[in-house]
Image (cartoon, helix red, strand yellow):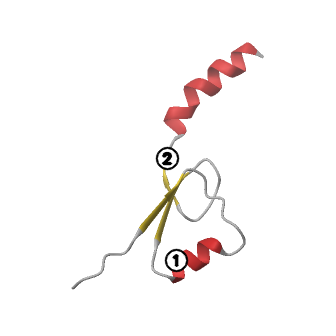
Amino acid sequence: MVRSRPIVVGVHGLFADGADIMLEREGARLVTTNTVLHASNRIDVAALIAPAAVRMASLA
C-alpha cells in the first residue's frame, strides 16, 4: 500500500518555533499563501488583495 504524503494548508506561513520543520520532517508538504513570507508560500493572493488595497489607499 502506497502512503500518500499529507498536505498541510495554511493561510499565513506563521508557525510556532520549529513546527514547520517538524511537520516537514514527518513527511508533510506545507502550502501557504504569500501574505507572510515563508518557504511554504505556494498560493499567490496578490491579485485578490490588490483591488482592496487600492480602494483603501484612495480613502486615506
Residue drawn at 66 percent across, 59 percent down: 14
Quarter of the image with the C terminus in it: top right
Spot occupied by residue 54 in the image (x, y as percentages of width and height): 63, 23
Residue at the bottom extreme, as displayed: 1
How many residues crowd around disc 1 within 10 Å: few (fewer than 14), some, or many (20 or more)? some
Label 2 element class = loop
Label 1 element class = helix
The residue to which callout 2 is attached is: 44
Residue drawn at 40 percent across, 71 percent down: 6
Which amino acid is tagged 1? Glu
Instruction: Say which of marks 2 and 1 sits in front.
Output: 1
Spot occupied by residue 55 in the image (x, y as percentages of width and height): 63, 18
The residue to which callout 1 is attached is: 24
Which amino acid is tagged 2? Asp
Q: Is residue 28 above or below residue 47?
A: below
Q: Is residue 14 above or below residue 2?
A: above
